[in-house]
Image (spheres, grey):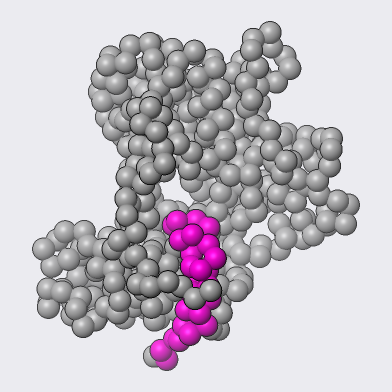
Amino acid sequence: MTEPVFDESRRLQDRLHALVPGGAHTYARGADQYPEFMPPVLVRGSGARVWDADGNEYVEYGMGLRAVTLGHGYAPVVDAVRSVLDAGVNFSRPTVTELAAAEDFLDLVPTAEMVKFAKNGSDATTAALRLARAVTGRDLVAVCEQPFFSVDDWFIGATDMNAGIPAATSDLTVRFGYNDAASLRARFAEHQGRIAAVFLEAATALAEPEPGFLEEVRALCDEHGALLVFDEMITGFRWSPHGAQSVYGVTPDLSCWGKAMGNGFPIAALAGKREFMELGGLNTDADRVFLLSTTHGPESMSLTAFRAVARAYRETDPVSAMERAGRRLADGVNAAAAAAGVGDAVAAIGRPSCLVFTTRDADGAPSQAFRTLFLQELLRRGVLGQSFVVSAAHTDADIDHTIRAAAGALTVYRQALEAGTVDGLLQGRPVAPALRRTAAPRRLPGGAAR
């Protein structure tokens, strides 16, 4: 095995740290999420492969934080976007592309009656909350105990990374458990007449809704007059092009979309029932809601990219391709783990189109240090990713490469388990949770060069 070098990536990462807080524009993409001395800074991608500034080639997983389902540089999307560039991309009045994109979206998501486009998921979820508060005249929001809904204060204020957010704002967010309708019922009882909206992902990579759970959430919202909001950022176009709401047969009042809508191009959407969405429009006598009003929300490139993605989902079956690739990958990695005698510590688990992997220590406890060792050994063998989230572009060759890489990484992992420590095997400090109170344990050791 030829050892990859990271000299240029390290130099570029140091410059990023000097110029960009956190060294990346998304915390989940940060250097603290990867082995300390192996921070690939990428230059291009094609299909499921990417290349870094040192020329190292990887099979990539996670695919742009799950935003790319068709593969990097997917020609029908790129060609469609290229075709509109010479006609201008941002205007002072709506374009026919805006209408066509809205029609395409509502054709894919028949449970919604109106849609408004934006550029990122946080704008969509925050607009949904503002709308729900206007509809109900209430101030609280009940948020499911799931990883992420928004960068805005109403959600981040309830996480560990809440510096700069007033307690008065954080106090307006209450939590309930997934597959625990009783906990939501309790929140309604504790805050009679104050909960405007209930936010949740209908499903996650590791958790399917138990029979009746989503239906009971829907019923509780109806009973207490709160709006039900589904976050479809991940499930939309990965569970189904019609969203998790179509898979599980429960219709929310509002739903928020993004990520795979543009196959990497920046686009998000708020969709929902007409009676609510119209409060942000002109067909109402009520006080208007400042719903979504963005300079770049209707620019032609991303809407055209979405239309090409929608066409790909109508004409092909990316979801089935992801499910097939994911099942093959999980079977191969889990067989390799069993063969290495580490099946209790490392496993590819979850929905096949949205796989993650476990990394446990010798005592069976989840371990950031052992996770980092696994990431390190995968990187050394040409696999990049914080997960095993696939795209429809992952070929059998990509999956075979990954299984071989995992098998090699697991031999090192077994050595660490047998020693009871990663010392002597892991280079640098372990990764750390993206949302944490302090920069430690991955605080920069010194000032980055300027």
Task: State the quadrant of the N terminus.
Answer: bottom left
Q: Is residue 247 above or below residue 33?
A: above
In the image, is residue 59 part of the stretch drawn in magenta? no
Q: Quadrant of residue 424?
A: bottom left
In front: 9, or 307?
Answer: 9
Q: List x then y, in percent, for residue 279.
A: 64, 17
In front: 309, or 134?
Answer: 134
Q: List x then y, in percent, for residue 386.
A: 39, 63
Question: In the image, 380: left or right of 417?
Answer: right
Q: Is residue 78 above or below residue 197?
A: below
Q: Is residue 223 above or below residue 68?
A: above
**Rendered residue at 57%/50% (across/down):** 260
In front: 361, or 25?
Answer: 25
- Residue sitting at the far right: 87
**Rendered residue at 28%/14% (across/down):** 189
Question: In the image, 94: left or right of 33?
Answer: right
**Rendered residue at 57%/57% (across/down):** 68
**Rendered residue at 34%/59% (across/down):** 439
Q: Main secondary structure of the magenta part?
A: helix
Q: Is residue 431 above or below residue 316?
A: below
In the image, is residue 10 part of the stretch drawn in magenta? yes
Question: In the image, 267: left or right of 21?
Answer: right
| Residue 56 seen in this snapshot | no
Q: List x then y, in percent, for residue 57.
A: 52, 79
Please provide the residue range marked out in magenta.
Answer: 2-29
Q: List x then y, in percent, for residue 408.
A: 31, 81
- Residue sitting at the far top: 285
Q: Quadrant of residue 219?
A: top left
In front: 24, or 331?
Answer: 24
